[in-house]
Amino acid sequence: MYSTFYVSKSQCMTCDNVVLKTLGALQGVFGAEMDRIEGQIVVNHTDEVSREQIAATLDNLGWKEIVSQDAEIEHDEPSIWGCAL
């Protein structure tokens, strides 16, 4: 199954790679792809891992899910990883 998460648009490939690597390491995840322009992450996974578990992992990495793409973002919090570039 595929789950799509809308997140803040990233400007850092290093941060993107950490997120994709962490998601890929979850039991039941076959892979993940990030669309930096649209601000979405698509995760291919089995029912071993729930959408909520994946969302919690993203949240722990500092990536807040945007519930509605139409909603205005008043404050775009940076990733907890920061960017050293």
Image (cartoon, rainbow, N blue to C red):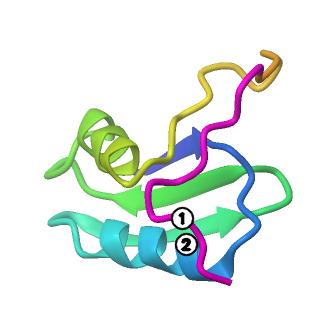
Is the residue under label 2 in contact with that under label 1 (CB below 8 Å)?
no
In the displayed orientation, state which residue is furthest to the top: 71
Callout 2 crowding tier (Cα within 10 Å): few <14, some 14–19, many ≥20:
some
Residue closest to the eye, 47 or 39: 39
Q: Earlier in the sequence, mark 1 or mark 2?
A: 2
Please report the bounds of the magenta region as a residue range.
74-85
Q: Nearer the viewer, mark 1 or mark 2?
A: 1
Q: Nearer the viewer, residue 61 or 41?
A: 61
Q: Name the residue tied to disc 2.
A: 15
- Does 79 sit left or right of 47 as displayed? right
Q: Amino acid at mark 2?
A: Cys
How far apart marks 1 and 2 lie (CA) works out to: 8 Å
* SS under mark 2: helix
Residue 41 placement (x, y as % from top left): 59, 55
* Label drawn at residue 38: none
Q: Residue at x 63, y 43 (%)?
A: 7
> Is residue 71 left or right of 31 when viewed as pictured?
right
Q: Nearer the viewer, residue 57 or 43?
A: 57
Name the residue at 66% across, 80% down: 13
Q: Residue at x 77, y 19 (%)?
A: 74
Marks counted in the figure total: 2
Identity of the residue furthest to the front in this view: 84
What residue appears at the point 46 percent right and 58 percent down from the top-left corner?
43
- Amino acid under label 1? Gly
- Residue 82 tag number: 1
Which percent across, then down, holds residue 1? 40, 51
Q: Is residue 17 left or right of residue 77?
A: left
- Is residue 68 depicted above or below 20 in this figure? above
* In the image, residue 70 above or below residue 46: above
Q: Position of residue 53 (x, y in %)?
A: 23, 41
Magenta stretch holds residue 5: no
Secondary structure type for disc 1: loop
